[in-house]
Image (cartoon, grey):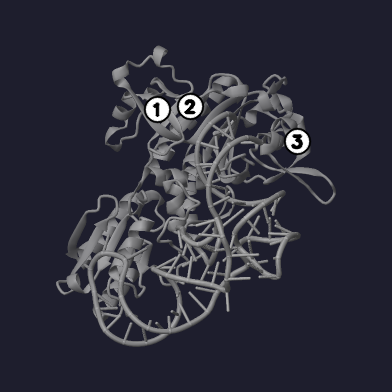
RNA sequence: CGGGGUGUAGCUCAGCCUGGUAGAGCGCCAGCUUUGGGAGCUGGAUGCCGGAGGUUCGAAUCCUCUCGCCCCGACCA
C-alpha cells in the first residue's frame, strides 16, 4: 500500500476526549473514529488489526474443534422471555420495536439464540458434543462506556457455546478452551493470566477470567510468582500446571488467607479479555434443549460458553505494547509488516530503490506500507513510529551512495545499516518466521 | 444513576469575568527556499462559538432550559 493514497488520518496531538493511552493512540494513528459514546467506526488500518486479531481467535477456535456460524444481531423478545432474561437483563439491553410493534432486541449475548438453534436441529446424543461459535458485534447499553474500544457499548466478541451429554464431557471442552485461550493470547504477544472467577448466578465453580497484564488495566490482580517462571523466555506455559496456581482479582483476594506466601505473591493490573464458563443446564432447562439418549430417554444437555472480547483486545494490545512515540504492534497482528520509507522522494536513485523494494516485497508476500509522500524525513519517522509497524526500511541518499539501507526495529529501536539485498532478506525472513 | 468537568476552524486551545463585526498554533491549499527525527518565508481557504429560548440597540460573552462528550464512583465483559 502506498501511503500517498492510503486513508490514514493521523493526528499530531492528543484529542481531549481520549484519556487513556490506547484510546489516544488509536485515534492518533487513524484507526478509529467515534460515532457516539462507546460506539466506533473502524478506519482501514484499525480494521486491518481487528481482522488480524479476529483471525487468530478464529484459527484457535477451529483448532479446538469449534465450528463457526453467524447469528443474527437482532433477536425476538419472545426467546428471552423463555429464559426469563428479557426482564432480568435490565437497561443494558437495547430494545427495539419494529413496524409491526413486535418487540426485538439487539443481542448483548447469544445463549438463548444458540440454544434455540440447537434444540430445533439436534435431537440425538450421537450428535454431541457440539461447539458452535461466532465472531459478531454485540451491543450492551453500558451506563458509562469509557476508554475507547476497551469498554464500548458496541463491541466485537467471539462467543462459543458448547453442548454435551454429561458434565465430564463439558469439563473436557472447558479444559480445552482454557488451554486454547492461553495459546490465543500468546499468539498476539500478550501474557494473559487465568483468574478463577465468581461464576455469579450461574452456579458451579468452573469459571475463569483471562486478564492481560497492562499498567492501565481496570482490575488489580494477585497471582503466584510461579506464573512468571512458567512463561519465562516467552515459552508457552503448561495449562495443567497453571491451573494449580493461585490467582485472584482484588475483590476476591484475601491477604490474610492467601495460600501463596507473601514473598511469592505478585500483583499487577489486568484487562479482562476472555471469560470461560461452565453453564450446566441453566439455558437448556429453560429452553428445553433435550436430546434422545442411548436408551431413548430424554437428556437435558449440559452447556458451556466461552467469550473473547475481540475489539477490546485491540485496545489491550496497545495498552501492553507502546512507548512515548506510539504503538508497537506485535508482529502477528500488525496492520503491515514493514514501513518502507523513501527519505527523499524525487531523488531518482531513492525513488528507484524504493519502487524496486516495494515490488519485490509484495512479490515475496510481505505487505509493505510504502511512504512515498513528499514529506520531510522527520515527519515520516514520527508517523511510522506512531503507527507502530514492526519494521522500518529506510532508504535515503546518504546510505544509498554506499549501497546501504537502514532497517529499524520498532520495538527495540535497534537500527542497522546493511546492503539493500540484506535488508530485503532480513524483512522477508522475519515475516516468514511469523507467518509460516 | 450520583458527583465533577467540558463544548469556539480538521486537531490543541485563547477570547467569556468587564456584551460592541471570530482569534492563535498545528493541519489543509498555492508558491518559493529547504530536505536523515513532526522545516522556514509569503499568500489563501475553513466557523449556525453544541442547540433552543430569554435579557439587550447589540450576545461566543449575561440568564434559563436542553443535548453531546470526558473523568471519578456505583455497575459491568
Foreground pick, A224 / A245: A224
Q: Nearer the viewer, residue A1 or B36?
A: B36
**Measured from the top left, where is residue A79 in percent x and y?**
75, 36
The numbered mark, 2 or 3, whose residue comes first in the sequence reads 3
Mark 1 falls on what kind of element? helix
Q: Which residue is mark 3?
A: A79
Foreground of the two, A163 or A112: A112
Q: Is residue A349 left or right of residue B75?
A: left
Image-based side of A385 in relation to B16, left or right: left
User: Pointer 2 and pointer 1: residues touching (CB < 8 Å)?
Assistant: yes
Both on one chain, marks 3 and 1? yes
Chain on which label 2 sits: A
Residue A421 found in image quarter:
bottom left
- Write down the chain letter for disc 3: A
Q: Is residue A1 visible?
A: no
Residue at (29, 60) in percent of width and height: A392
Q: Secondary structure at mark 3?
A: helix
Mark 2 or 3: the one toward you: 3
Q: Position of residue A120 (x, y in %)?
A: 73, 35
Query: Label 2: which residue?
Result: A175
Quadrant in which the N terminus of chain A appears: bottom left
> Residue A91's spot in the image, x, y percent?
69, 37
Q: Which residue is mark 1?
A: A239
Q: For the point 29% across and 28% down, which residue is it?
A: A229
Mark 3–mark 1 CB contact (< 8 Å):
no
Q: CA distance from mark 2 to mark 1?
A: 9 Å
Amino acid at each position: 500500500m502506498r501511503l500517498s493514497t492510503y486513508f490514514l488520518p493521523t493526528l499530531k496531538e492528543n484529542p481531549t476526549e481520549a484519556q487513556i493511552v490506547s484510546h489516544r493512540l488509536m485515534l492518533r494513528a487513524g484507526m478509529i473514529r467515534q460515532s457516539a459514546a462507546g460506539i466506533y467506526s473502524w478506519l482501514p488500518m484499525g480494521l486491518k488489526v481487528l481482522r488480524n486479531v479476529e483471525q487468530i481467535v478464529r484459527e484457535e477456535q477451529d483448532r479446538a474443534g469449534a465450528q463457526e456460524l453467524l447469528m443474527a444481531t437482532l433477536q425476538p423478545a419472545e426467546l428471552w422471555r423463555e429464559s426469563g432474561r428479557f426482564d432480568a437483563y435490565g437497561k443494558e439491553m437495547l430494545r427495539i420495536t419494529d413496524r409491526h410493534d413486535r418487540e426485538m432486541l439487539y443481542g448483548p449475548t447469544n445463549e438463548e439464540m444458540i440454544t434455540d438453534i440447537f434444540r430445533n436441529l439436534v435431537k440425538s446424543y450421537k450428535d454431541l458434543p457440539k461447539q458452535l461459535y461466532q465472531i459478531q458485534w454485540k451491543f450492551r447499553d453500558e451506563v458509562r462506556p469509557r476508554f475507547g474500544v476497551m469498554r464500548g457499548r458496541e463491541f466485537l466478541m467471539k462467543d462459543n457455546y458448547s453442548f454435551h451429554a454429561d458434565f465430564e464431557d463439558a469439563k473436557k471442552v472447558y479444559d480445552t478452551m482454557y488451554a486454547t485461550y492461553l495459546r490465543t493470547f500468546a499468539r498476539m504477544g500478550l501474557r494473559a493470566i487465568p483468574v478463577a472467577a465468581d461464576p455469579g448466578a450461574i452456579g458451579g465453580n468452573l469459571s475463569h477470567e483471562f486478564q492481560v497484564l497492562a499498567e492501565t488495566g481496570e482490575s488489580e490482580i494477585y497471582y503466584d510468582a510461579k506464573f512468571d517462571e512458567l512463561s519465562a523466555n516467552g515459552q508457552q506455559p503448561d495449562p495443567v500446571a497453571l491451573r494449580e496456581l493461585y490467582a485472584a482479582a482484588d475483590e476476591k483476594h484475601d491477604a490474610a488467607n492467601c495460600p501463596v506466601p507473601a514473598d511469592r505473591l505478585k500483583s499487577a493490573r489486568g484487562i479482562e479479555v476472555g471469560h470461560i464458563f461452565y453453564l450446566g443446564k441453566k439455558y437448556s432447562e429453560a429452553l428445553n434443549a433435550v436430546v434422545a439418549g442411548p436408551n431413548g430417554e430424554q437428556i437435558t444437555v449440559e452447556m458451556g460458553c466461552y467469550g473473547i472480547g475481540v475489539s477490546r483486545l485491540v485496545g489491550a494490545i496497545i495498552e501492553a505494547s507502546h512507548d512515548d512515540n506510539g504503538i508497537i504492534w506485535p508482529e502477528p497482528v500488525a496492520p503491515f509488516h514493514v514501513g518502507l520509507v523513501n527519505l527523499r522522494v524525487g531523488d531518482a536513485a531513492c525513488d528507484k530503490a524504493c519502487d524496486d523494494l516495494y515490488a519485490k516485497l509484495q512479490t515475496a508476500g510481505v505487505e509493505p506500507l510504502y511512504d512515498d509522500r513528499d514529506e520531510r524525513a522527520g515527519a515520516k519517522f514520527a508517523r511510522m513510529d506512531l503507527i507502530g509497524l514492526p519494521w522500518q526500511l529506510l532508504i535515503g541518499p546518504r546510505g544509498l551512495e554506499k549501497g546501504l539501507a537502514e532497517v529499524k526495529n520498532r520495538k527495540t529501536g535497534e537500527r542497522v545499516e546493511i546492503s539493500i539485498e540484506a535488508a530485503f532478506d532480513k524483512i522477508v525472513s522475519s515475516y516468514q518466521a511469523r507467518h509460516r
